[in-house]
Image (spheres, grey):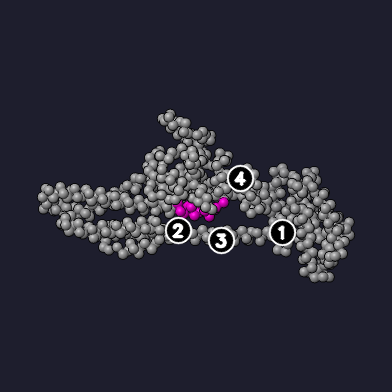
Amino acid sequence: MKRSKGLGFKLTGAFIVFLAVTLILCGVTTYLSQMSIYREQCKTNVTNVAKYLRTLITADGDDFLQFTEYYKDHYGDVNIPVDASEYLSYQETYEELLAKYYPGQTLWDELGFEELNDEVKNAYLSYTYLYWVLTFEKAAQDFGLTYTYFLTLNDETYYVNYVIDAVRQSRREHNEFLKEYVAENPDDAEGFLDLYQGDEEEFLYLNDEVHNPLEENELMWKTWETGETQDGFRVWHNQWGDTYGYYVPLFIDNVKVGLIAGEIDIADVNTEILKNTLKQLAVIAVVFAASLAVLMTYINRKYISKIIALESSVQDYASSKDSGVVKEIEKHISGHDELTSLSEEIISMIIEIENYIKSLMEVHAELDETREHADLMQELANKDALTGIRNKTAYDKEVKRLEWQLDDGDTKFGFAMVDLNFLKRINDTYGHEQGNDAIKRCCRLVCEVFVHSPVYRIGGDEFVIILEHHDYDHIEELVDQFNREIEALSKDETLEVWERISAAIGYALYDKVRDDSVANVFKRADKAMYQRKSEMKAVRS
């Protein structure tokens, strides 16, 4: 500042005016350059967040599509607290309901989503919605954005649905806002849908649907129609604040699903640009004090050329996402001025973004591997190694479910016990390999007859069937069928001795007069089986 004063004493009035005009022009030029650079930085930051979220969503694939489809028609059926800060408890509720209604089955493997009842579907919707809301909010926080959200669009009506909303509103708050808006803008009243979802203060308003004409948001609609990310920002001035909005299209299996959006506060952007501009003007003013001609040469070589090179490098990175641009930026770094600091900050930002995204991808891959390993271990823990059906561990879990079911008043269940005859004789006479073959043949017959029920191997030659629904209602027919087929096998002279399997079956259905527990039903089924075995004169030696 002192050198600027000294320059003022040496210059004529005309030069002072010229200098003032030149500084203004330089200030405008610098501001525009900084605006371009910083907006590119903001766009890069928003794009990275959107791509990160797009990577997570794409990894879920059909699961996310199923969520959005069910959400469109059933968002009004769920009640999610406005201040919900975790999703794990909701996930546990969903998993408990799934285990209760569909024991031993998992979604997407044994079950299709359409097979679930409404209670399980709504529990799934609640926990999935919360998971994505919290993921979007954390991404915005980690990357320094004001908002992130997910939209679905209707290009015929120009209505936009905020599926994953950036701003949490209670139902009452939203209804009050609609009433105030319509009161202030009666001409727009017809443009609002009937979005009433109740006046509960504590529950989230979901699926905000807004009429967003093409002329008011050309950038958003162009991104949607072309399926390509557009240059530039959408400037928002509304009750949520003044922000720059940016949009990235979301494709799943080459199908356009919606837009991932991010917003940055305009005040923060303009403040940062103004600071950088003032720094550049200060440098320019000091340099002008020596000589106008020397100043122009110096600026062109020392600053302007660097700004152009830096801008070009940043644009290259924004378009290619190639971190190799760092080397190009480093070529133009020299001295210890603001541009050097800015270049170093940009280099640091690029490296941090690259490392962060790489780390996220690695963590995501590790989580996938861990989940797959856990699923495999869970499957092995519940599967009988010889027959491939469920084992004693899986049976014990189902017994617990039946106990809960019995406590809830659901009493339509029973057990069928099957015991393979003469297994010890087969093992001793023909060998354990033939004994194993007899066990597998018996298992196969049980599974073919009781095709609607889960079958468990709970001992060397013992199988138990949990009877519910169809097999519960037709147990006598199934037992007769089993006995007929066993008798036919035992008389088939074309088979080897150990292949002519013999087995006894007995069953018991829950009787509220006779049974006070699940275990008591099992004991009666076991007793009935041994009675049948005695009738067959096949009691074990």
Which amino acid type corresponds to the residue marked 3 in the rendered image?
A: Glu
Name the N-terminal-most of marks 3 and 4: 4
Q: Secondary structure at mark 1?
A: loop
Q: Which residue is mark 2?
A: 357
Determine the CA span between mark 2 and mark 1.
43 Å
Q: Which residue is mark 4?
A: 121
Local packing at callout 4 (Cα closer than 10 Å; few below 14, some 14-19, many 20+) is: many
Q: Point out the stretch of residues depicted in magenta.
A: 50-62
Residue 502 on image: x %, y % = 84, 60
Report the Cα–Cα distance between label 2 and label 3. Answer: 18 Å
Q: Amino acid at mark 1?
A: Ile
Q: Quadrant of residue 427?
A: bottom right
Asked if residue 89 is among those painted magenta in the image, a careful observer would answer: no
Write down the residue under mark 3. 369
Amino acid tagged 4: Lys
**Is 258 located above or below residue 323 in the figure?**
above
